[in-house]
Structures are given as structure tokens and as C-alpha cells.
Image: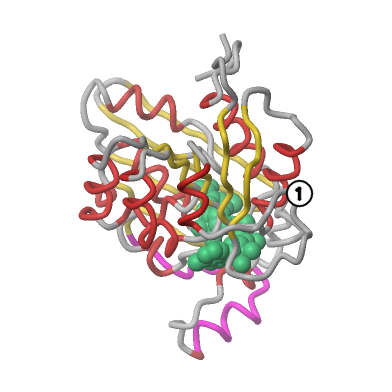
Amino acid sequence: MSRATPRKVGLIGWGAIGRVVGGALAAGQVPGAELVCVVDNRPLAGTAPAPQRTVEQAMETCDLIVEAAGQGVVREWGAAILASGTDLLIASTGALTDDTLTDKLLHTTPGRVYFTGGAVGGLDLLQAVRAMGPLDEVRLTTTKLPATLEQPWMDAELLRRMRSATGPVEVMAGTARDVPVKFPKSTNVAASVALAVGDPDAVRVSVVADPAAAHTSHVIEASGAHGAYRFEVRHLPAAANPATSQVVPYAVLRSLAALAGRTGQIL
Ligand SMILES: NC(=O)C1=CN([C@@H]2O[C@H](COP(=O)(O)OP(=O)(O)OC[C@H]3O[C@@H](n4cnc5c(N)ncnc54)[C@H](O)[C@@H]3O)[C@@H](O)[C@H]2O)C=CC1
Ligand SMILES: O=C([O-])CC(=O)C(=O)O
């Protein structure tokens, strides 16, 4: 059953994700949800289908805010949004590698915090498995085009290897605690896996740059007392931002449909 009154949605981030999400909302493609305003730190000059507002204004007029801007927005505004009574759907899950912030977001009321599955699948099942007890081993291997993984902290030698690579190059091996900090705009998926299994330190992550990676791939492998799990996805990158997979805005729209109470939704 749908909610009696539509959810009033504010969107932070008018980029590769936000434009598709905002366009679909404005076109009425998510019954029970309407786009009220858009927040971005760049002037949008009327290019969005709803007025540009500040985060403070969005909190006053919306009952659900979608973050599709970056980890910094989650850190700066997450708790304030929830404290204002506005629900928050987060795409930049990488901010949740900070336990203090995670704790705050999970315990600040009366708003409720949600995370989109984003670019990866299987998180619902891993969360169910985790309810039976901890997993022994969880691995994520993310492979992308080298240019989408370049970071200011990389030394000249690593950049040279990435730029001249003719095959896959591992650019970082670590955990879901430290990888999303090093690649803030391109490895949120690691933090999403960690949210599903309940422990960022338990997820081993390998980030691979591959000049032949026409598709971004994420392979999740997990095992424990109750079984073994493997999820592999290959996505075309979004044209507007190749660090983001094309499917991500549609994952956000699916999350929004669930929050708007769409019947028949797979949860
Ligand atoms: N959970 C997941 O699977 C995924 C999560 N993401 C997250 O979503 C974020 C957005 O992705 P895209 O749309 O591809 O990025 P994008 O770079 O295309 O767009 C980001 C937009 O947010 C705006 N923005 C940035 N900082 C802001 C701030 N402090 N206040 C207001 N606006 C701000 C920018 O001006 C830009 O318009 C990524 O940075 C990443 O953290 C992205 C892909 C997958
Ligand atoms: O996790 C991220 O930030 C982006 C990503 O890998 C994807 O969209 O496939």
C-alpha cells in the first residue's frame, strides 16, 4: 500500500547520480515521491526541474533527503538532517568508515537513516546471513579504468604504472575501513559491503586499475558457518562520471520506491 501523502524529496548533488534521480522524480516515475528541491554547491541556473535550495531550506520543506554528492556532505549534514526530523538516504556510504559518525547517524532521531545498495548486489542476503552470526571471510575486488582511480596521494611511480599499464594493476589492498578513505569518490561499495556484514575491518578489499575495464566490476566473496556466497557485477560506467556505474541512480530510485511504500517491491 502506498503512503497517503507523497514523500517530499530533497536531492543533494546534481551530478551523474542526481540528474537521473531528479529527472525521474520530476517525471513522476516514483509514485508516492515528489521532488521538492535540489541542493548543489555549484549554481544550477535553472537546469534542474526543481528550485535550488540550501541544505537548511531542504530540511525545512522535505521529509526525505537523498545524498548523492559526496562523503563530506554526510559528515557535515547527516546528523543535522536526522535531528530535524528528515529521513536521509545515503549514497556516499564511504563516510561510514568513521565509527563515531556511524554511531551518531544510527542513533540520531527522529529522522531515520538509510543506505542505497548502489553499485553492488547481494547486500540484502549478506545482511540476512550476518544475522545468524559473523562471517569468517569477506572479500571485495573492485576493478575500474585507471583514470577513475587516480588520487592526489599517489606517488609518481604508482601513477606511472597506472598510466602505462597494459593489464590489471592492484593499486591498493586494504580493508573496507581504509580503502573508502583513500578513494572517496570511487570505492563507496567497500563501505556498503561492510555495512551489510557489520564490520569494516573484516572486509578485505583489493582495488584494481585495468585499462581494458570497459565495465567496472565488483566481486564480493564471503563465507561462514552457514554457507558461501559470491556476487559478481559488471557495469557500464556513467558517461557523466566514469567513476560511478550507470546503474547507481536506478539503485537510488529503487531505494526511494521502497521508502515511498511501493507495493510489490523486493526488499
Ligand atoms: N554507494 C555506491 O555504490 C556509490 C556511491 N557513490 C557516491 O555518490 C557520490 C556522487 O556520485 P556522482 O553523482 O557520480 O558524482 P558527481 O561528481 O557526478 O556529482 C556530484 C555532485 O554533487 C555536488 N556536490 C559535491 N559536494 C557538494 C557539497 N558539499 N554540497 C552540495 N553539493 C555538492 C557536485 O557539485 C556535483 O554536482 C560519489 O561521490 C560517491 O560518494 C557513487 C557511486 C556509487
Ligand atoms: O563505490 C563507488 O563509489 C562507485 C563504484 O564503484 C561504482 O559505481 O561502481
Question: What residue appears at the point 56 percent right and 54 percent down from the top-left corner?
Answer: 12
In the image, residue 25 above or below residue 181: above
- Picture quadrant of residue 255: top right
Magenta residues (range): 157-174
Pick the residue in front: 94 or 215. 94
Identify the image quadrant of residue 45.
Answer: bottom right
> Quadrant holding ligand 1?
bottom right
Q: Looking at the picture, how far across and down is residue 32, in whole percent?
A: 62, 23
**Residue at horizontal 48 percent and vertical 70 percent from the top:** 171
Asked if residue 123 can be seen in this view, the reply is yes
Does the rendering let one see residue 243? no
Callout 1 amino acid: Pro
Mark 1 is surrounded, within 10 Å at the Cα level, by few (under 14), some (14 to 19) or many (20 or more) other residues, namely some
Asked if residue 4 lies left or right of residue 98, the reply is: right
- Magenta-colored stretch includes residue 172: yes
The percent coordinates of residue 244 (x first, y second) are: 63, 55
Asked whether mark 1 and ligand 1 are closer than 8 Å, the reply comes as: no
Residue, disc 1: 49
The N terminus - image quarter: top right
Q: Is residue 199 above or below residue 224?
A: below
Label 1 SS: loop
* Percent x, y of residue 174: 34, 61
Residue lying farthest to the top in this orientation? 1
Q: Is residue 216 left or right of residue 171?
A: right
Q: State how many labels appear.
A: 1
